[in-house]
Image (tube, rainbow, N blue to C red):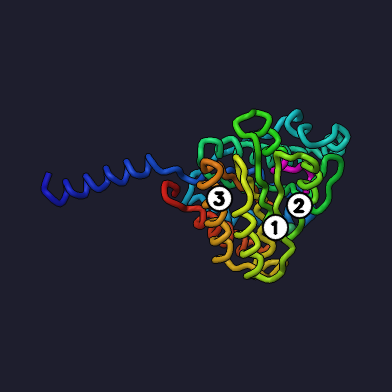
Amino acid sequence: MNFLKEYVHLQQKVIKIKSRGEKMTKIIYHEDFAAHYAMDPAAEPGRLEPAVNLLKEKYSLIVPKPADKEQILLIHSERHYHSISADRLLLHTALLSAGAAIEAAKTAMNGEYTFALCRPPGHHASPDSCWGFCYFNNIAIAVKEALQVGKVNSALIVDFDLHFGDGTANAFEGVKEVSFWHSHETNRQRYLEHLRSDLDNLDADIVAISAGFDRGVDDWGGILTADDYKEIGTLLAFFARQKCQNRLFAVLEGGYNHQALAKNIDAFLSGLKTPGHA
Ligand SMILES: [Zn+2]
């Protein structure tokens, strides 16, 4: 082996060792999320494909399994489960979406960041009712299960969707172990400052993110740029590193401009990259 070859070989070895030590962000995705399960903007054909195509080149994918009924009943009433189960395709996709959030939380317990690229979204689903393209509250179910398993004793849910996650707030009303953050601030700079200063004062064993991208400049809210989503990612990864032993997971909520959604998720995930995390 000549010197150059040996050098390249050694370099590759170093890179391999380095990447083994780094925690890689994982995407949780199932091809059944492409199903046209409802007639609403979240269920629109082609909504997730640009994001999947972009992210599968950069991150490894985990295929989730559907949540079971007992997991749904951690948050929802039997009556609510029954009302969704009348439509088999909707039920299947909604169980899979909740399953993706549960898998994201479970994987995050090892200090790996995860992003559930799933639909239908969930943050407008309350224990006994739902609206706003949501059916089961994916993030609430995942957080409740994480607390029940007992590896964490408290959770912070950061909801940066344009809309208030009323379902999530209702699910954890009066539950002191779970804090919920959302801001109605419409000024871009003040929005980011609000998040930054509140994170300074909050504490939790795990950070769960209701990642809605409909506040984007090319989406309904028209406020945040791709760089802003990157900044949000950086702020949350810093919080996770400082306070949660790197336990961080995110679950997709809104975001209706298909191309902008892909770009903004990618920017958010690049913001999560911190020392020891790729
Ligand atoms: Zn929204």
Give the position of the N terminus as an image quadrant.
top left
For residue 19: magenta?
no
Quadrant in which ligand 1 is drawn: bottom right
Q: As shown in the figure, which amino acid type bears the numbered disc 3?
A: Phe
Q: Pointer 3: residues within 10 angstroms few (<14), some, or many (20+)?
A: many
Q: CA distance from mark 1 to mark 2?
A: 8 Å
Rendering coords of residue 278 (x, y %): 44, 49
Q: Is mark 1 within 8 Å of ligand 1?
A: yes
Q: Which mark is residue 239?
A: 3
In contact (CB < 8 Å): disc 1 and disc 2: yes
Name the residue beneath numbered marker 2.
165
Rendering coords of residue 36 (x, y %): 73, 49
Task: Find the magenta span and give its range.
Answer: 133-140
Q: Pointer 1: residues within 10 angstroms few (<14), some, or many (20+)?
A: many
Pick whichever, 247 or 266, lies toward us.
247
Q: CA distance from mark 3 to mark 1?
A: 19 Å
Tag 1, which secondary structure?
loop
Q: As shown in the figure, which amino acid type bears the numbered disc 2?
A: Gly
Which image quadrant for residue 183?
A: bottom right
Pick whichever, 154 or 230, lies toward us.
154
Q: As shown in the figure, which amino acid type bears the numbered disc 1?
A: Asp
In the rendered view, would you say 39 is above or below 184? Answer: above
Rendering coords of residue 227 (x, y %): 54, 66
Name the N-terminal-most of marks 3 and 2.
Answer: 2
In the rendered view, would you say 255 is above or below 82? Answer: below
Q: Which mark is residue 161?
A: 1
Q: CA distance from mark 3 to mark 2?
A: 21 Å
Rendering coords of residue 29 (x, y %): 59, 44
For residue 135: magenta?
yes
Q: Residue at x 62, y 70 (%)?
A: 189
Mark closer to the observer (3, 2): 3
